[in-house]
Amino acid sequence: MPILVFHIVSIGGRHSKKRGTIFCCPRPCAWVILFAPPIYVPTDASAEVMQAKHAEMQRELEHVRDIAESWFSVGNAEREKHRAEFSRSNPQA
């Protein structure tokens, strides 16, 4: 099974705090879910390969986080650039 790295971000919405828990109900169409390409780890992976895959997973997580959290503040040209990047890395998109 592949490892799927993703980040979800929303802007605005209603917030409420009850008993120390903060709940956010985002506005419709005010959220982004961004998935990185799947990461495959061989079943017979050595400790070195596992460490490399972990580092790859962390890099991808930071990459999709940075894009998702800036999504609403960038222009259409930048969004299209990111769409093209992820379409190339996922031929089924």
Image (cartoon, rainbow, N blue to C red):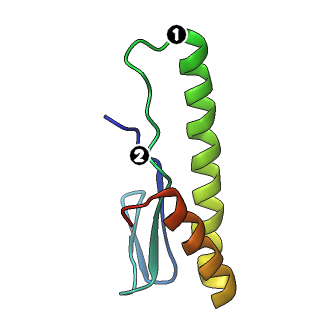
Asked where in the image residue 71 lies, by quadrant, the reply is: bottom right
- Res 52 quadrant in image: top right
Crowding near pointer 1: few (<14 within 10 Å), some, many (20+)? few
Identified by mark 2, the residue type is: Leu
Reading the image, the residue beneath label 1 is 46
Q: What residue sits 45% from the left and 77% below the top?
A: 31
Residue at point 60%, 20% (across, down): 51
Q: Which residue is mark 2?
A: 4
Q: For the residue labelled by badge 1, is the local secondary structure a helix, a strand or a loop? A: loop
Q: Tell me the element at label 2.
A: loop
Work out whether 20 lies above or below 51: below
- Quick check: 48 above or below 64? above
Residue sitting at 60 percent across and 39 percent down? 58
Indicate the position of residue 35 as horizontal and vertical percent values: 46, 58
Where does the C terminus fall, quadrant-wise? bottom left
* Separation of residues labelled 2 and 1 (CA atoms): 20 Å
Q: Is residue 62 left or right of residue 4?
A: right
Q: How many C-alpha atoms fall within 10 Å of the one at disc 2: few (<14), some, or many (≥20)?
A: some
Residue 37 screen position, x and y as percent: 48, 51
Determine the residue positioned at 68% across, 80% down. Answer: 78
Q: In the image, what residue type sits under mark 1?
A: Ser
Against 16, residue 50 (above or below) is: above
- Is residue 4 left or right of 58 when viewed as pictured? left
> Which sits earlier in the primary sequence, circle 2 or circle 1?
2
